Amino acid sequence: MIVRAHGKLNLSLDILGRTPDGYHDLRMVMQSVEFGDDLDVELRSDGRFTVDPGQSYLPSDGRNLAVKAARLFLEGTGLGADIRVTKRIPVCAGMGGGSADGAAVLRALNRLTGRNMPVEELCQFGLRVGSDVPFCVMEGAALAEGRGEKLTPLPCLTGCAIVICKPAFAMSTPELFVRSDSRRSRLRPDTAGIVASLETGDAAGVARRMYNVFEDVLDRRQGEILSIKSALMDMGAAGAVMTGSGSAVFGLFLDDSAAQTAFDALSARYKECYLTRPCPAAAV
């Protein structure tokens, strides 16, 4: 079975504090997009697991979330799986590429084995793979809380095109959390306003409220992220923001021709630039 692993974007990201176990308490609004990886998943009867990750620098063992997901789902069945990834989602971009691949494997195996679990049950498998995987199983739009695993489905973003642009550097998620912890005052996204705008189909309302608190702690080396945001806004985006812990930035465009123009201009300067649209919740 060939299945699409859709990329995810953070329309907002807020850090509420630290939890007793040392993790961070998050509140985010996330939206999946049509752009993503394709995975070819085939069952094996000998219990072995193989993965072609699509890029030589990606792991092909249990560190790969696609393999981890397959092993967990098929545990105790005696079955294995061959997984081949056509990799498009950029690595270290804040778009949940590894999580999306793991989620896509779960959806594929759910059908191939005939288990036909409902999405809620499949999300519980996803949580054992990684905290972003349940959202990537569900897809569409959701309010994510806790470590990202507590999900409230929301109406999908509509009426817009999306231009995604990733600069040629990665970000350290632990370092961003450390910097954020040391910051005393913080602007916060209007999460309730974004949720209300999604519920009324107001893409412009979503766009003007998008915010990511990690942008408050970027250093000079990462100033290019703000430059990309400015370029997107100058070319007609209704709003632009960094997704996750970066380094990808995206802009929401209410006009398709403006989105195409921005994509053409930025793709001439950046290798990893993509034009896409929001996608609805997955059918499992």
Image (cartoon, helix red, strand yellow):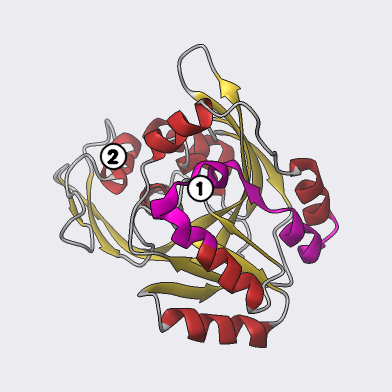
Label number found at residue 91: none
For the residue carrying disc 1, how many other residues have a C-alpha within 10 Å: few (<14), some (14-19), or many (20+)?
Answer: many
Q: Does residue 162 show up magenta in the picture?
A: no
Q: Is residue 205 visible?
A: yes
Q: Is residue 20 left or right of residue 213?
A: left
Q: Calculate the distance from the C-alpha at mark 2 to the C-alpha at mark 1.
A: 22 Å
Tell me the quarter of the picture where residue 208 sits. bottom right
| Location of residue 212 with respect to 52 vertically, above or below | above
Q: Judging from the image, what secondary structure is the residue with disc 2 in?
A: helix
Residue that appears at 65% across and 34% down = 186
Do residues under tags 2 and 1 come within 8 Å of each other at their CB atoms? no
Residue that appears at 57% across and 73% down = 231
Range of magenta residues: 200-226
The amino acid on which the numbered mark 1 sits, given as a three-letter code, is Gly
Earlier along the polypeptide chain: callout 2 or callout 1?
2
Magenta-drawn stretch, dominant element (helix, strand or loop): helix
Residue 28 picture location, percent across and down: 62, 41
The amino acid on which the numbered mark 2 sits, given as a three-letter code, is Lys
Tell me the quarter of the picture where residue 204 sits. bottom right
Q: Badge 2 is on which residue? A: 68
| Location of residue 263 with respect to 63 vertically, above or below | below
Q: Does residue 212 show up magenta in the picture?
A: yes
Quadrant that contains the N terminus: bottom left
Q: Badge 1 is on which residue? A: 244
**Which residue extends farthest top?**
20
Q: Judging from the image, what secondary structure is the residue with disc 1 in?
A: loop
